[in-house]
Image (cartoon, helix red, strand yellow):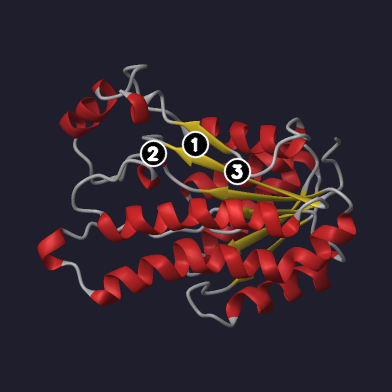
């Protein structure tokens, strides 16, 4: 399936992994709706990079996806601007350390709202356009920790586990017109505050003994969008073997 000329809405596209995914799709001639919440200048730079990279059209869209009203408004805005939506990449996420003894209901609700609820309702809002595409695609960026949670991040890990359930539920609800799959990154982009010692420890915990890259996640997304035309409801792990180490 050719991706050229299609429209992809990539959430959380202003920074980090979302940015890399947006640019990877742009390199294939995809027109990109660059979603952001607060990083306006970074989002505009991504849109400019899309245009310079392939000449494909791009526009920025602000939305706080933790607001229950935002998914429908965002989908409507993108559809008005581009006239179609062919691909939805749910990449926006929050990742906060919450030690068990200090975790609060607000921590729990904040992670669930953005990491699990928003992808579900954004897919719902985009579904009419994705069906009209004839080859609609939803890609959910989850996390290997949704299968093997680690200490001090319980709300985050639980929200990514919920996203994996959402992924399967959407695949059933949107078949046969729309394919829905998940990518489960491992240690591909450590927080900037992480020490070199911590990075080495994480690297050694993988089977491949190295950190991954955002480009590896982007390539997985492209595979699911472009080549995996008989795949839906799947989970593609990109973690250097961390989940089975």
Q: Position of residue 1 (x, y in %)?
A: 85, 35
Residue 74 visible in this rendered orientation of the protein: yes
Q: Secondary structure at mark 2?
A: loop
Q: Is residue 193 left or right of residue 114?
A: left
Q: Earlier in the sequence, mark 3 or mark 2?
A: 3
Q: Position of residue 136 (x, y in %)?
A: 79, 52
Disc 3 crowd, CA 10 A, few/some/many (<14, 14-19, 20+): many
Residue 192 in percent (x, y) is at 29, 45
Kindly state the secondary structure of the residue where label 1 is placed. helix
Answer yes or no: do the residues labelled 1 and 3 have beta carbons within 8 Å? yes
* Residue named by callout 3: 21
Looking at the rendered structure, the secondary structure element under dot 3 is: helix
Residue at the left extreme of this rendering: 101
Q: Which residue is mark 1?
A: 214
Q: Is residue 230 left or right of residue 5?
A: left
Regarding residue 13, the answer to whether it shows in the image is no
In the foreground, 117 or 203? 117
Vertical relation: 207 (above or below) 152: above
Comparing 155 with 64, the one in front is 155
At x 41%, y 35%, the residue is 188
Task: Name the residue located 67 percent from the left edge and 79 percent from the top edge.
Answer: 73
Q: Residue at x 41, y 24 (%)?
A: 240
Image vertical order of residue 36 relative to residue 192, above or below: below
Binning the other alpha carbons within 10 Å of mark 2 as few (below 14), some (14 to 19) or many (20 upward) gives some
Distance from the alpha carbon under mark 3 to that under mark 2:
13 Å
Mark 1: few/some/many CA within 10 Å (<14, 14-19, 20+):
some
Numbered label attached to residue 135: none
Which circle's residue, 1 or 3, is located before the other in the chain? 3
Q: Which mark is residue 189?
A: 2
Label 1, label 2: how many angstroms apart (C-alpha)? Answer: 7 Å
């Amino acid at each position: 399936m050719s991706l050229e000329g299609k429209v992809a809405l990539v959430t959380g596209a202003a920074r980090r992994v979302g940015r890399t995914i947006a640019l990877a799709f742009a390199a294939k001639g995809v027109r990109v709706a660059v979603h952001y919440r607060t990083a306006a200048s970074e989002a505009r730079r991504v849109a400019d990079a899309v245009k310079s990279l392939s000449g494909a059209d791009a526009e920025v869209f602000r939305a706080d996806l933790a607001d229950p009203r935002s998914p429908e408004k965002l989908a409507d805005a993108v559809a008005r601007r581009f006239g179609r939506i062919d691909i939805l990449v749910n990449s926006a996420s929050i990742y906060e350390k919450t030690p068990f003894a200090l975790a609060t209901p607000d921590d729990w609700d904040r992670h669930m709202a953005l990491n699990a609820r928003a992808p579900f309702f954004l897919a719902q809002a985009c579904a009419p356009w994705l069906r009209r595409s004839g080859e609609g695609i939803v890609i959910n960026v989850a996390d290997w920790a949704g299968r093997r949670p680690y200490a001090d991040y319980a709300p985050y890990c639980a929200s990514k586990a919920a996203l994996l359930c959402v992924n399967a539920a959407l695949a059933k609800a949107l078949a046969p017109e729309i394919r829905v799959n998940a990518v489960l990154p491992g240690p591909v982009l450590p927080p900037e505050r992480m020490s070199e010692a911590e990075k080495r420890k994480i690297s050694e915990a993988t089977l491949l003994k190295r950190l991954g890259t955002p480009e590896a996640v982007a390539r997985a997304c492209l595979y699911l969008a472009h080549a995996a035309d008989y795949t839906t409801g799947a989970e593609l792990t990109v973690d250097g073997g961390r989940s089975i180490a």
